[in-house]
């Protein structure tokens, strides 16, 4: 198995992260093909391990987008200059690739799909199901999975996963962008 992270842009630029599960010899044989689309290509364990690492990736990404969305709604409620706030947050410990790649989309209310919420919802189902199967408690993961599901159920499944912001807006009673047709 060889799931990827990096979205459409990463695929186009050949910059995907690829989490490979399998035998070392098979990994080495496949590596030249994977190098055509990936930059970070790592054998993470036996077959199936790639999917497990991908699930962990999706958990981290969803939790970060949810936190970023909540932070923007919070900042806007206080009338803070969000462009400046995001810049300073990005320079501190809150800085992340999620902040770098998704904050401006949220500020601009531009949710054209890169990675669709409906797909992230599917992935969060994989995470929560696998956690249950392994007997692992993931209270934040379960909550974020429900928030993703809620946003999809509200009609935003075709939007980029930064569209989680719209779910936060709904919960705060501050929705300002109509659902796209």
Image (spheres, rainbow, N blue to C red):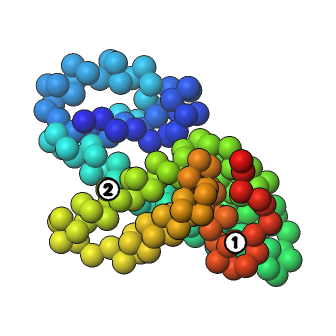
Q: Looking at the picture, how far across and down is residue 15, in whole percent? A: 50, 31
Left or right: 121 with respect to 91?
left
Q: Is residue 94 in sight in this rendering?
A: no
State the separation of the CA atoms marked 2 and 1: 26 Å
Which quarter of the rendering shows the N terminus? Answer: top left
The residue located at (15%, 31%) in the rendering is 24
Nearest the eye: 171 or 96: 171
Find residue 169 and name its label. Answer: 1
- Tag 1's secondary structure? helix
Category of crowding for the residue at label 1, using alpha-carbon neighbours closer than 10 angstroms: few (below 14), some (14–19), many (at least 20): some
Nearest the eye: 154 or 86: 154
The residue located at (14%, 25%) in the rendering is 25
- Tag 2's secondary structure? helix
Q: Looking at the picture, how far across and down is residue 102, in whole percent? A: 65, 53
Residue 74's image quarter?
Answer: bottom right
Find residue 126 and name its label. Answer: 2
Residue 131's image quarter?
Answer: bottom left
The residue located at (35%, 59%) in the rendering is 125
Q: Looking at the picture, how far across and down is residue 11, in whole percent? A: 51, 29
The residue located at (79%, 79%) in the rendering is 77
């Amino acid at each position: 198995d060889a799931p990827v992270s990096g979205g459409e842009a990463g695929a186009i630029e050949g910059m995907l992260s690829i989490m490979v599960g399998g035998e070392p010899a098979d990994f080495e044989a496949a590596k030249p093909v994977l190098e055509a689309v990936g930059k970070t290509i790592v054998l993470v364990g036996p077959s199936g391990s790639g999917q497990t690492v991908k699930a962990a990736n999706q958990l981290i990404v969803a939790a970060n987008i949810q936190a970023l969305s909540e932070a923007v709604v919070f900042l806007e409620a206080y009338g803070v200059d969000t462009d400046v706030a995001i810049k300073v947050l990005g320079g501190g410990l809150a800085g992340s690739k999620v902040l770098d790649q998704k904050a401006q989309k949220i500020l601009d209310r531009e949710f054209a799909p890169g990675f669709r919420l409906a797909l992230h919802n599917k992935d969060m189902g994989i995470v929560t199901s696998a956690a249950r199967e392994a007997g692992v408690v993931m209270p934040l993961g379960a909550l974020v999975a429900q928030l993703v599901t809620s946003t999809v159920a509200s009609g935003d499944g075709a939007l980029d996963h930064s569209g989680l912001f719209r779910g936060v807006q709904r919960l705060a009673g501050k929705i300002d962008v109509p659902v796209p047709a």
